[in-house]
Amino acid sequence: MAEHATGRRGSYAKGVAKREEILTRALDVIAREGYGGASVKELADAVGLSQAGLLHYFESKEELFTEILRKRDERDLAHFGSTTLAAADLAALRTGYVETVRHNAHVPGLVQLFARLSVDAGDAGHPAHGFFLERSDTLRTSFARAIAERQAAGEVTDRVDADTLARIFQAVADGLQLQWLLEPDVDMAAAVDALFDLLKTEKR
């Protein structure tokens, strides 16, 4: 019995490792080749699997793409530090957020995937629906907490409540991505950085 249990654990571990390999390679393919290179066939070829073999590790194409975005967030969090989605300090949050937005300009395929999947996720039955709700809540909670602390210290305007400001930041970042896809000359990072400047209270 113990031998069978060990075998099952080994098989499960191999499955998890293969799934992680697929997501990592897929992330690189889309970042390098663009959203047009994100077909199941292209991604399967990148990891040496058939299309059926690739989807063995995911319930559907939609779940695969959802997990690719989740992996993207994990990579950004590791690269830019805890400032990306879970910081309480506004200055640190600003640095991480602006740098993440600046980085997105270098991976248009992932921005396209995010934009397309976020629209599809409006359907409550879509595999990405829960991911986007959770992601949005985490982002807004971090912003609201950091903004509220600076409002209490008198460093950030309190003309608008922290929760509303947090939602505005998310809306601006998401909207800028759509503008940038249409107008590649748009400087998303500069626009987001300017929004942080607008939070400052006026010096008397």
Image (cartoon, helix red, strand yellow):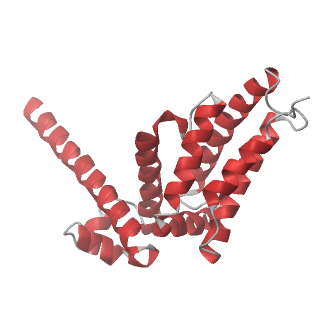
Q: Nearer the viewer, residue 33 or 120?
A: 33
Q: Nearer the viewer, residue 4 or 171?
A: 171
In the image, residue 24 above or below residue 2 = below
Image location (x, y in percent) of residue 96: 54, 41
Which residue corresponds to the image point at 43% horizontal and 79% vertical from the top-left? Answer: 36
Which residue corresponds to the image point at 53% horizontal and 69% vertical from the top-left? Answer: 112
Report the number of discs. Answer: 0
In the image, residue 86 above or below residue 177 = above
Image location (x, y in percent) of residue 170: 69, 50
Which residue corresponds to the image point at 19% horizontal and 38% vertical from the top-left? Answer: 9
Q: Nearer the viewer, residue 51 or 138?
A: 138
Image location (x, y in percent) of residue 171: 73, 55
Left or right of residue 9, residue 99 in this image = right
Q: Nearer the viewer, residue 148 or 103?
A: 103
Which image quarter holds the N terminus?
top left
Q: Extreme front residue here?
A: 204
Which residue corresponds to the image point at 31% horizontal and 70% vertical from the top-left? Answer: 43
Q: Extreme left residue here?
A: 3
Left or right of residue 1, residue 176 in this image = right
In the image, residue 123 above or below residue 94 = below
Which image quarter holds the C terminus?
top right
Q: Picture quarter containing residue 149?
A: top right
Q: Picture quarter containing residue 25?
A: bottom left
Image location (x, y in percent) of residue 144: 72, 34
Left or right of residue 44, residue 59 in this image = right
